[in-house]
Amino acid sequence: MTRTPGQRLLVALPYLWLLVLFLAPFLIVLKISLSDLAVARPPYMPQFDLSEGWAGVAAFVDALDVENYVFLAEDSLYINAYLSSLRIAAISTVITLLIGYAIAYALARAPRRWRPTLVMLVILPFWTSFLIRVYAWIGILKTEGLLNQALLSVGLIGEPLTILNTNTAVYIGIVYSYLPFMVLPVYATLEKMDESLLEAAADLGSSRLAAFFLVTLPLSLPGVLAGCFLVFIPAIGEFVIPDLLGGSETLMIGKTLWVEFFNNRDWPLASAVAIVLLALLIVPIVLFQRQQMRQEIGT
Amino acid sequence: MTAPFAPWADPAASPLIEIRDVTKRFGAFEAVKSLSLNIYEREFFAILGPSGCGKTTLMRMLAGFETPSEGAILLDGEDLSPVPPAKRPVNMMFQSYALFPHLTVEKNIAFGLKREGTPSGEIAERVTDIMRLVQLTDFARRKPDQLSGGQRQRVALARALVKRPRLLLLDEPLGALDKKLRQETQFELMNIQETLGTTFVIVTHDQEEAMTVSSRIAVMRAGELAQVATPADLYERPESRFVADFIGEVTILEGRVSGADAVGATLSAMEGAPDLRVATDTLPPLGETAWLALRPETVTITPDRPEGADNALPGTVLDIAYLGNLSTYHVALADGRVVKAQESNRFGANRRGITWEDAVWVSWEEDAGVLLQA
């Protein structure tokens, strides 16, 4: 198939977009991660200087090294931060899945005329700022917050619970914020499931529970996988939620990166942290892409 | 010669399924109205009716997906109502087939046997046998979306049959197939039913399909049984205008009963024409309205008044439907009513020399039609 110049331009546009807005910034960050910290503006060396010709380029390349990465590997703080991020993201994903699946199941079983409204309600929180919603949780979770007041007034607890500034608060924040990303893909698979499949399962001798595990769950797996990736991937790098709701015990790589960049002004090290994070995320992202592709071929 | 299979005519035979005064309401709507019906072992029983007549509801009650609002359904004399679908010796082949898309053909078929805890050796054996019966052996490891419509239909059939149910329900089983495949599959279904001896109940809106496959047909109308009879009886001896009209083509002439004797009755159907003679066993009351149902193939069309015909009326040809093997002529009588006459084209349609607008005669014998009082 030959393409007209117009078609070529149309195909080139998204590539150009990716080149300018994704690949170029990535290369800049990669370059900074290979540089050294300097008291200068910008705060790293070497700077690229074309005026010195080839000798300048050679000196520039020569000055780049991987010592920031070596430092990351040697200092247990960073390794722990990465592992802790993975753990928090994984636990949050599992909790989100359990709650999100139940919500999606209820939505898919709701009377047809109610479904658009209910789905709307799931999406509704997106209409306000993410930051404001996380702040709202501070008001709910703090010692004299809504939750403690409610629990105290019904006499369930004798003294206020400490939830804010703990990992529990981070889990609550992540689960709350990412729930729609789980509910929607799971709902999409459950909703299009032919109800006669469950009747067929019953007809062939399955209890309702068996029918769920043998028919409903396997058929909703594509939605479950999509939802898990959509929660897990951004949760690893999450910064706002651990910063606002977490405490000193909360170790997440997004927060570490922020501290390196803004508090320590160590741009090269912060860039290295970011590059490693990206490398870590590529694994689940590639898995996600492949799963989506397989699903498209399947249908 | 063996006696024909007709357990319904044998007063000593006890039915496999007894539907007793079953009513099913959805809110204020009565889908099935106080319906009673017996179905016997080894029958291929068809429930036929237009959409919305309650036939699917009746089938779903047999499967256990709906419970009767009133009345009872008995299997071998025992009430089925407390038995959930999973525990009934009844299996259903769904209209959509409802094959599990994530399982292979083999696993779809084995699903029900695994649920009842059949030993795996026996499962393998029975699955292999049934796959051979429905000619699916080569497709055992395919997923449903890699099969054609006809193959999917056979998987659905095998999956329901492998559990050896006492009763197999088929909900519009051939509706999704094209016409040629449907006709082949009808005969396949009949062969399988004969081989296994399982009682089949098929729900369909396709009267041709019901006529082809079944031993008896129940025609349903608005939640009630219009008539239960063998295909031949239903076609040749309908009990109402609805059944006569629903099964095959028919001309229905309204008239008033003007006379009755030992062999038949006369019907005054048209001003200025002789009364029509009809042979009938049940003598209608004189002076009442009655209807004569005439199948097109019993009516002869001739250019001139036929000699010696029991009934003959003049008319003009309104329409000719050429069907290949047959031609159906729509003949308008003097008062505008239309009589359909069908002729075989064995010797060519043109040889008859009848065309549009021609003045013709339609005639039939007195035992050709059926006199209906409803």
Image (cartoon, coloured by chain):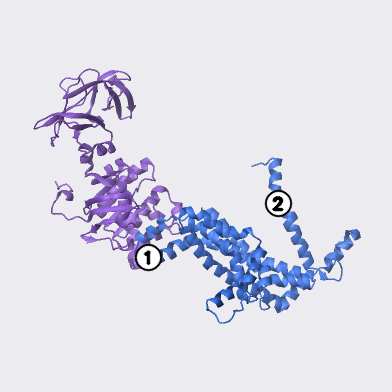
Task: Determine the residue located farthest toward the bottom in the rendered image.
Answer: A158
Q: Are marks 1 and 2 on the same chain?
A: yes
Q: Colour of chain A?
A: blue
| Mark 2: amino acid | Tyr
Chain letter, colour purple: B
Q: Position of residue B190 (x, y in %)?
A: 28, 48
> Quick one: A17 or B50, which is closer to the camera?
B50
Spatial CA distance of label 1 from label 2 is 53 Å
User: Which chain letter matches label 1?
Assistant: A
The answer to whether residue B22 is visible is: yes
The residue carrying pointer 2 sits among few (fewer than 14), some (14 to 19) or many (20 or more) residues within 10 Å by Cα, namely some
Write down the residue under mark 1: A207
Q: Position of residue B348 (x, y in %)?
A: 30, 24
> Quick one: A290 or B10, which is closer to the camera?
B10
The answer to whether residue B140 is visible is: no
Task: Determine the residue located farthest toward the right in the rendered image.
Answer: A52
The residue carrying pointer 1 sits among few (fewer than 14), some (14 to 19) or many (20 or more) residues within 10 Å by Cα, namely some
Looking at the image, residue A142 lies above or below residue A27: below
Looking at the image, residue B306 lies above or below residue A25: above
| Mark 1: amino acid | Ser
Residue A15, disc: 2
Q: Secondary structure at mark 1?
A: loop
> Quick one: A122 or B324, which is closer to the camera?
A122
Residue depicted at x 51% and y 59%: A187
Q: Secondary structure at mark 2?
A: helix
Residue depicted at x 21% and y 44%: B230
Task: Determine the residue located farthest toward the front in the rendered image.
Answer: A153
Question: Is residue A251 rendered to the left or right of residue A51?
Answer: left
